[in-house]
């Protein structure tokens, strides 16, 4: 969405865009992360059960956030091990005796090739401008016969018949794109990308979220809209009230719309 008041310094996402934009306020970020876990964990766990994660697997949960899937994997693999990584490890506590927490930037920090039977990453690559270069590195860390599982969101909000929703989501997605480098269409490329990297037995598991129906999706959006409204005000824009008006509609029983589709894909390394 065009915006003549946008400061030009926003047009190149900084390398630490995610941290600067979304993780600044500890309480708000924890609220967003725990809502995301409540939304996405059932779908993630269903897919991890489909690939039959084994008790002795070596797993890594990259960009582990508040750690719910890392905790699940550590419990699921009592004879294996779990390495939970993040740029910001402050929420990665109480993961289990077979778990290691590592401060690790997946863009630049490495693991030896073939280190893991499972590499899982959810809702991180969509935020990294370097995603196309990072993906082949993650793929290298999967051992032969092991699995790469990636989950990212796709937005269809531009096609919404609700004008305010379409407009505010346009501001949200444009702001995330310019300040973080987020791409909410990239996940559509994953089947072809995994196939080109030589992964087989592809399983694609999309889950479409509903906004306005209460529960964790609304909690996630209330926290995200509030954080972004503050950012917009701080950076000299005048549309924070529009973002907060959409947040207020979450309490209106007549408001319900399609939110993101989370695309989860699993592939096995030959
Ligand atoms: C939207 S959260 C998702 C958290 C978790 N994967 C989940 O789905 O619940 C994104 C996480 O990725 C982390 N992150 C962002 N860039 C990263 C990078 N380059 N390397 C490792 N972690 C990163 C953030 O600190 C944050 O915890």
Image: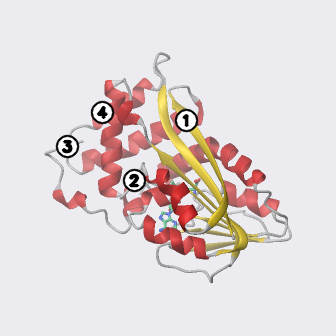
Residue at the (37%, 31%) spot, across then down: 159
Camera sees residue 5: yes
Mark 1 or 4, nearer chain start: 4
Residue 211 location (% of width, % of height): 50, 30
* Quarter of the N terminus within the rendering: top left
The Cα–Cα distance between marks 3 and 4, rounded to whole angstroms, is 11 Å
Find out whether the residues at labels 2 and 4 contact each other: C-beta distance under 8 Å.
Answer: no
Q: CA distance from mark 2 to mark 4?
A: 17 Å
Of the numbered discs 2 and 4, the one sitting upstream in the chain is: 4
The location of residue 213, given as percent across then percent down, is 55, 25
Q: Is residue 108 above or below residue 77?
A: below
User: Sequence order check: which comes first, mark 1 or mark 3?
Assistant: 3
Answer with mark 2 or mark 3, whichever residue precedes in sequence. Answer: 3
Sequence-wise, which precedes: disc 3 or disc 4?
3
Note whether residue 104 is visible.
no
User: Badge 3 is on which residue?
Assistant: 2
Write down the residue under mark 4.
167
Q: CA distance from mark 2 to mark 1?
A: 18 Å
Distance between the alpha carbons at the discs numbered 2 and 3: 17 Å
Q: Of helix, strand and loop, which one carries label 2?
A: loop
Q: Position of residue 184 (x, y in %)?
A: 42, 49
Give left or right: position of 75 versus 43. right
| Residue 183 - label | 2
Q: Earlier in the sequence, mark 2 or mark 1?
A: 2
Question: Disc 1 versus disc 3: distance between alpha carbons?
Answer: 27 Å
Residue highlighted by disc 1: 209
């Amino acid at each position: 969405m065009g915006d003549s008041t946008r400061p030009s310094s926003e047009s190149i996402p900084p390398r630490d865009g995610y941290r600067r934009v979304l993780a600044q306020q500890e309480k708000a970020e924890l609220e967003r992360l725990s809502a995301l876990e409540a939304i996405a964990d059932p779908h993630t766990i269903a897919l991890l059960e489909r690939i039959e994660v084994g008790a002795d697997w070596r797993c890594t949960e990259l960009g582990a956030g508040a750690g719910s899937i890392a905790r699940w994997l550590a419990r699921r693999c009592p004879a294996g091990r779990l390495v939970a990584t993040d740029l910001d490890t402050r929420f990665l506590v109480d993961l289990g005796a077979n778990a290691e927490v590592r401060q690790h930037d997946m863009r630049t920090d490495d693991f030896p090739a073939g280190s893991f039977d499972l590499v899982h990453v959810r809702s991180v690559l969509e935020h990294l401008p370097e995603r196309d270069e990072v993906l082949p590195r993650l793929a290298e860390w999967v051992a032969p016969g092991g699995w790469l599982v990636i989950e990212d969101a796709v937005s269809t909000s531009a096609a919404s018949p609700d004008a305010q929703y379409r407009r505010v989501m346009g501001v949200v997605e444009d702001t995330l794109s310019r300040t973080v480098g987020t791409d909410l269409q990239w996940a559509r490329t994953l089947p072809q990308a995994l196939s080109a990297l030589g992964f087989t037995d592809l399983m694609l598991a999309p889950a479409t979220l509903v906004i306005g129906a209460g529960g964790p999706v609304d909690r996630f959006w209330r926290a995200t809209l509030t954080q972004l409204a503050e950012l917009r005000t701080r950076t000299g824009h005048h549309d924070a009230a529009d973002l907060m008006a959409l947040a207020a509609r979450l309490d209106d029983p007549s408001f319900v719309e399609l939110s993101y589709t989370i695309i989860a894909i699993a592939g096995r390394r030959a």
